[in-house]
Amino acid sequence: MYVSFLLAAAAVITTAAALASLPERPIRGGYGYTRSPDRSVSLTSPRPHDVLDVTKLPKNFDWRNVNGTRYVTISRNQHIPHYCGSCWSFAATSALADRILIAKGRHPHNKSSVDVHREVVLSPQVLLNCDKKDNGCHGGDQLEAYRYMKENGVPEEGCQRYEATGHDTGNTCTDRDVCENCLPSKGCFPQKTYDKYYVSEYGTTLGEQQMMAEIYARGPIACSVAVTDEFLKYSGGIFDDKTNATDVDHAISIVGWGEENNVPFWVLRNSWGSFWGEDGWMRLVRGVNNVGIEGECAFGVPKDDGWPTSTTIKEDEARQEEEDVTNDAEEDQSMKSTLAGCRQKLHFAGGERVTSQLPHETMDLKDLPKTWDWRDVNGKNYVTWDKNQHIPKYCGSCWAQGTTSALSDRISIMRNASWPEIALSPQVLINCHAGGTCNGGNPGLVYEYAHRHGIPDQTCQAYQATNLRCDQFAICETCWPSKESFTPGVCESVKKFTKYYVSEYGSVSGADYMKAEIYKRGPIGCGVHATKKFEAYTGGIYSEHVMFPFINHEISVAGWGHDEETDTEYWIGRNSWGTYWGENGWFRIQMHHNNLGIEQECDWGVPLPDGSKPKDFVISIDYQGNKEAGGATMQDFLHMVALDEVSDQCHLFTDVFDRLVQLILAFIAVFVLYIKRKLELPIRPMKVWVLDVSKQSLGALYIHCISIILSIETVASTSTVYDECGIYFVNYVIDTTWGGFIMIVFLKGINKVAARFGVVSIAHCGDYGDPPRLQIWWTQFFVYLVALTLMKVHNVLIIWVFFTDIAYFSTNLFSAFEDYRHLELSIVMLVVPGCCNAAQFWIIDSYLKIESNQLQLLGSRVDDSEKLCIGQKAVACFSQPPLFQGEESVKSVILL
């Protein structure tokens, strides 16, 4: 009865914990669009449907590809880092950003081709912070968003990073909440000068023909739809809702239309990540108001043909805000490093991986053009969007930003700058220490990680400028509202998404070799010595004499140029300090000398643009034991070998399967003890057996929980990603082998001390009186826990002393199971522990038996609750003499 009760309680508790930890599925309705009760429009020009002959519009039109040029900006994900009903702000800013790109192309205003084709990604976070007529993360109206942008303007994403929060969740709307910068020396503060983009007019449009005319003439529009269950599950094709749902609750943007197999459709952009639908987009049946899409649309027209307005906040306001801002540098460990000290010496743990001829080996360097810029190759921009590593707080992640920018640009080049634009996620690299953390890192390990594991795009993992755990959410996640919480909701890991791999990688230095690499294959990452003067750069061709450059910052180089007036060659570099720095986030720096060491240490990788894995992956190790140029340390080796695909990584306590395996382990342990009882001669009384088993079961649970916590926490607290299941395995093996012997020593010692002082209830372990008493059991259980604790402390000290070697061994022991993590967990939790348990029980039981208290049946088997014999050579049956004041008791032959 006791065993049944304990097992039932354990099952209920474990199952409840498992169910409670499961991400709740999204609730139906309330996805973020809320029609404003006091809508307004502001129109100053004729409507396109009034001046165009809509009957002559093309059968297919899509701003993703107009005469070979992509006019849509990058895909987004409103659902990370947690859920926020901000679709209205994403729909409005995405559509307007697309229109800015279109308008600048039509009206260049005598600007350079680089400026004309530069991608502008507007900040939806500013709308969430400051548009008080909308409800922030609890919903809003895209038409009201355009009103706000007409009155106040909106900056780029590099001014205010999306954090999935709003004024409804406690955000303020100060100058810092519109455009901020963060430095390790002063924390975060409002940026004094930056660009804003305004709307000149805004309005509504509805109906198929009006919508088509507006899209064709001026660009994408923002519309509302009714989200159904099938809409949520959409994965491709032309969607046609059959439920007649028109109760709109979600906002998207429409960028074009088409027809396939005589079925007309809209092309729409969602904000749920690239893993949803068709790379984050959808085709929806057109002309029948499916899911209400043709009844609720809005548009905004970029002011000044899409060109920005420079904004400078007042000096006294900026100073007051800086005084009011808490110095985040005191709170964030990453800010304790000096500004720009985020780049370690370039090296590759496994050596460079070069599988094809290098560009300078296949071309005559004299044939290189005098100028080359991947931002403008025959009028086309091949580089991806510009970033800011310093917000929402300072993070020394340049090593991840420069490398992912260069790789993303190379993917764009390989895809001829076509849709969809791929921008790799630097946060994944920070999460999993794939080169470093917010305290700096080595760009070389980024390429090795990308070669082995791949990197998803930024819609899988939002940049948060902080060191996060490398858990099941670290690679790709999404969040949804739940019944208990609309925002922040609940998050879950995404199982099916695309990662982009690197086939080969290496280093390059020297102007000519750098040019050849850039010209043939695209931008490269380079290290520079970021000085105070460089931090203050605002434009022009930069030069600074530094006798011995100390490489401390990673940037990317996308081309080179020549200034005819001064006859100066220069490099074209991209920084990651926001578009308010330098020349829209970029810089030009003198070539050959006085250039902060930019030509000394550069890195490159060749990405696979289709998401395929390298076919020739071979682990190549150049382990030298000490950190030298070209060599690798043990930690570097583990960076390359031990990092696993976290979405498939073995975790001890994260999902239903993990908990189910642990329930099975508990059942096996109790079942083994039950079988052992059946094989005993004589069989212990059931009550005594139950007390013995409960003591052992609770003790085993105690040690099991400690081992799980230690394994998880050691993995989370180290800068290298280890296999927590492997570390748990080593814990368990030590506990059940050497630990078993140590525990016997501790128990024997405790029993002898108890016998010496006359504490009979402790000295006679396993004797609970007759009838058995819980008070005696509790006393012995406490002693048992003390022995277990002493044993565990002893074993933990062993693991702590030899942790590096143990982690190395345990991580590589199960490396063959990297694609079969559930199988690994089964081996770690069931197969090996089952054998170890059985052996441990037998050994300890045999060791603890002594001649004076072994029990045997005399003659034939009888009821184990009645006649018992003592001694191996007994010839008659008699009752055991009372141990506790006239009470009979039976000595258990099992201690554990």
Image (tube, rainbow, N blue to C red):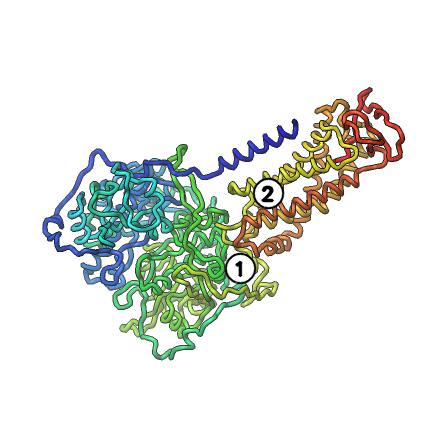
Q: Which residue is mark 2?
A: 708
The amino acid on which the numbered mark 2 sits, given as a three-letter code, is Ile
Q: Nearer the viewer, residue 803 or 857?
A: 857
Q: Circle 1: is it few (<14), some (14-19), or many (20+) Cα within 10 Å?
A: many
Q: How many marks?
A: 2
Q: In the image, residue 516 lies at what x, y percent?
A: 39, 73
The amino acid on which the numbered mark 1 sits, given as a three-letter code, is Met
Residue 868: quadrant of the picture: top right
Residue 103 bears which disc, if any? none
Position of the N terminus, as image quadrant, is: top right
Residue 193 can be seen, yes or no: no
- Answer above or below: position of 568 versus 796: below
Residue 399: quadrant of the picture: bottom left
Residue 640 bears which disc, if any? 1
- Answer above or below: position of 248 versus 475: above
In this rendering, position of residue 268 left or right of residue 452: left
Position of the C terminus, as image quadrant, is: top right
Q: Nearer the viewer, residue 65 or 750?
A: 65
Q: Residue at x 38, y 78 (%)?
A: 365
Q: Residue at x 13, y 52 (%)?
A: 54
Q: Residue at x 85, y 36 (%)?
A: 851
Label 2 residue SS: helix
Q: Nearer the viewer, residue 133 or 806?
A: 806
Q: Nearer the viewer, residue 184 or 696?
A: 696
